[in-house]
Image: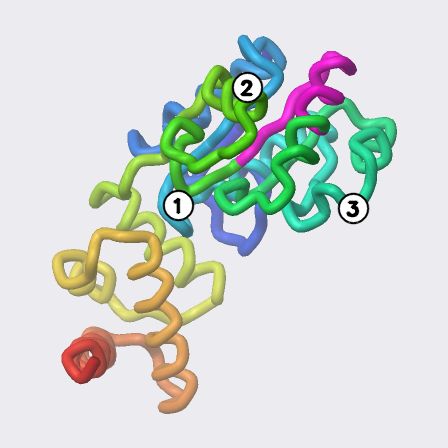
Amino acid sequence: MSQLALEFGHRTALDAEDFLVTPCNRDAVLWLDRWPDWPAPALVIHGAPGCGKTHLAHVWQARSGALDIAPAALGDEPPDVLLGDARYGVIDGIDDIANEQALFHLYNMAAVRGGALLMTARTPPARMAIALADLRSRLVAAPAVAVAPPDDGLIGALLLKILHDRQLRVGDGVVDFLMPRIERSFAAVGCIVDELDRAALAGRRNITVPLARRVLAQIEHSTDGD
């Protein structure tokens, strides 16, 4: 069985070749590589917002032919209608499922068909407040893999990737300047790139170290004001 070709990419997309593989997310990637030999009819990938859970889910969806099922749609239709002819489904964000009974029946339907559900969440099922005992037991028994907080390698690669995705012109030394000065989180990377993009557009200029310094100062001032 061939492994997922996950390499550094330079396009805004949810393809395998656009995913950045580092020690932070390698375990999750390895679990996707194990499919279809999962020990249960479900896999839960959990981690902080922006860590790549959705991207991984889309990679597996493309590979498996899974149906994308919105959490809010659970309960709108019977599970056989929701799945249609599919055996596999992706549910992105199960932390606040409103209809636990519907998810329970969908899980069972996928299992009966010899398929599986890939679900994403902020926290592992064992830490979720799941009231329905049968659903809780199934989700807790399913493998759950964490996408860990980003390391320096991933932060730097993510900065470069998002900047390239947006086709922004970045001067020498900008990423090296930013690395020790930004919070080690996916949300912080997205925030700083948003602000750099906005400042560069407003000033009709390339992104340089002086511009990055000014943007960081503005963000810090705004945070202090809160």
93, above or below 191, in the image: above
38, above or below 50, in the image: above
As helix, strand or loop, the secondary structure at mark 2 comes to helix
Amino acid type shown at disc 3:
Asp
User: For residue 58, what is the image quadrant?
Assistant: top right
Report if the CB atoms under discs 2 and 3 are less than 8 Å apart.
Answer: no
Q: Whole-Å distance between the Cαs marked 2 and 3? A: 22 Å
Amino acid type shown at disc 1:
Cys
User: For residue 28, what is the image quadrant?
Assistant: top left
Q: Residue at x 46, y 32 (%)?
A: 45
Work out which quarter of the rendered image holds the N terminus and state it.
Answer: top right
Q: Residue at x 70, y 42 (%)?
A: 74
* Mark nearer the N terminus (2 vs 1): 1
As helix, strand or loop, the secondary structure at mark 1 comes to loop
* Residue in front for this viewpoint, 142 or 197: 142
Residue numbers of the magenta segment: 106-119
Q: Which mark is residue 51?
A: 1
Magenta span contains residue 107: yes
- The local crowd at label 2, few if under 14, some if 14 to 19, many if 20 or more residues have their Cα within 10 Å, is some
Q: Whole-Å distance between the Cαs marked 2 and 1? A: 25 Å
